Amino acid sequence: MSDSNAVAAVTRALQVVLGQALSDTVRGVQVTSTTPDEAASGQNQPALNVFLYRMTIDGTWRNADPPGVRPGETGRPALPVVLHYLLTPYTNDDPHSRAALRILGAAMAALHDHCVLGPEDYDKSEGLGDAHLQPEPVRITPADLSVDDMSKLWSAFQSQYRVSVAYEARVVLLDSARPARAPLPVVRRGAEGRGPEASADPADPSPTLSGVTPEVAAVDDEIILSGAKLDAGTPVVHLTHPLFGAVSLVTTAVSEHEVRAKVEGDNLVPGPWSVTVVLTSDDGTRQVTRTLPLAVAPRITTSPLPLKGRRGSDGNVKLKVDCEPSVAAGQRIQLLVGDRPVPVTAFRGPREKKLTFSFPFSGPGRHVLRLRVDGVDSSVLDGDAVPPRFKDDLAVVLT
C-alpha cells in the first residue's frame, strides 16, 4: 500500500489535477509546489503554487486495524496523515490582478468538481509508491482559515501577502514498517468441529436460504446451498461481487432442502462474494432467496511444490507463484510465508495468474505458503487426512 512516498505522490497528483484544469484558463500557466518566497522570486510566467505548509494526524484512523489484517492477526496501524495546502496564484503584475484571481477561481472550481483523487490521477511513472492503491481515497476539502490564522501563516513565510485559499487532503495512510503477523488457521474446533445450525420456518411458503457449505470455496469446488422449498422452480445460483459483477453457476443437484452448484466462471476472481438462488416457476414467476456471503479462495497452482527460495544478491528472496482464478488489478494481494504477509511486487493487469513476491531473507527454514486476495486465503489443509493437518507440499524451503 502506501509508504513514505505517498505524501509526494498526493502532492504531485494535486498538481496534475490543477494543471489540467488551468491549462484552458490562462495561457502558459504553471503549477508549482515551492515555498511562497521562492515562488514569488523570479516568476516570469503565470503560476499557481501548491504549498504543503502543515501535516497533522487524523485521530479517527489512529487506532484502526491496517487494511487486510483479519481478526486474530497483529499489525501496527497505518499512520493517517492529513496534508494542509495553501494555493496561491502568481502573475507578473499586481498580486490581485484579474489574471491572478482568474487562476485562483479556476483552481477552486476544479477542486470543487474533482474533490476525490482516484487511481488515474496519480503519476505512476515517477516511482512514488502505491498511494493509488490505498483502500480509502484521498479527499480534497476546503479549510476555513480565519484572518488571524492567515496573517500568522504569511508572517511565518516572511513573504508579501497574496490572496490565497487553504485545502486539506485527507487521509493519506502510511504503512507501518513493522511486519504484520498472520497465524495459521485453526484446524479443528470442538469435538466434532461443527458450527451453528439453523432451520427454516415450515409454515413459511416462500423458499428460504439458510446456509452455504463450505463458506470458503475454490474454483471447481461444489457448494451446497441449504434451506427450504428450493425446488419450487428452476433454480439458478448467482454469485455477485461488489466490483466485478455477477456470475451464474451451473447447478448439479436440486432437492427441496438443497441446491448444489459448481464454482466456476470466466469472470470469477478470488475474494468476498455473495450468493443467492433465483427460482423461476413454469408460469415465469421469479422468487429470490436472501443473500448469504461466500468467499472464493485463490489456489496456488505452481508446480512443482514445495517451492525453493534462495537469498539474492540484494538480500531478498524472490518467489514466483501461479494461482487460479486470475486476480484483477486493484485487488489486495499478499503471499503469507509462515506468519509473514508479503505484498505482491509485480503485476501486469488487468488480470494475472502469475505473481511475483520479494521479501528479506530471514534465515533457512521451511514455511507454509498461503495466498491471500482481498482477505481470503488459499486453503492449506489436507482434507483427506485424519485428523486434519496442513498439506506437506504447500510450503517454501529457504536455503
Image (cartoon, rainbow, N blue to C red):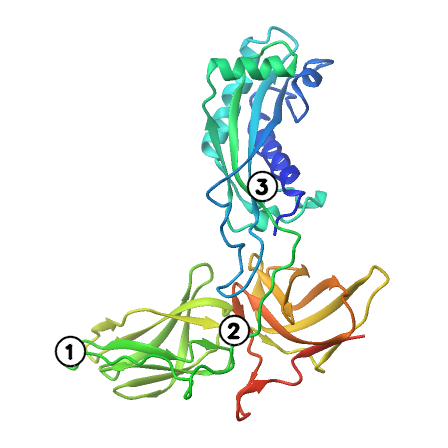
Dot 1 or dot 3: first in sequence order is: 3
- Asked if labels 1 and 2 touch by Cβ distance under 8 angstroms, the answer is no
Q: Secondary structure at mark 1?
A: loop
Q: At 49% from the left edge and 45% from the top edge, which residue is drawn?
A: 61
Q: At 53% from the left edge and 75% from the top edge, which residue is drawn?
A: 185
How many angstroms separate mark 3 from mark 2 (CA)? 31 Å
How many angstroms separate mark 1 from mark 3 (CA)? 52 Å
Farthest residue toward the top? Answer: 94
Q: Amino acid at mark 3?
A: Asp
The residue indicated by pointer 3 is: 121
Q: Amino acid at mark 1?
A: Pro
Residue 158, horizontal then vertical, whole percent: 66, 12
Q: Give whichever of 137, 17 is nearer the camera.
A: 137
Q: Secondary structure at mark 2?
A: loop
In the image, 272: left or right of 363? left
- Asked if labels 2 and 3 touch by Cβ distance under 8 angstroms, the answer is no
The residue indicated by pointer 1 is: 205
Q: At 57% from the left edge and 30% from the top edge, which residue is drawn?
A: 18
Farthest residue toward the left? Answer: 203
**Which label belongs to residue 297?**
2
Q: Secondary structure at mark 3?
A: helix
Residue 341, horizontal then vertical, whole percent: 63, 64
Q: Amino acid at mark 2?
A: Ala
Farthest residue toward the right? Answer: 313
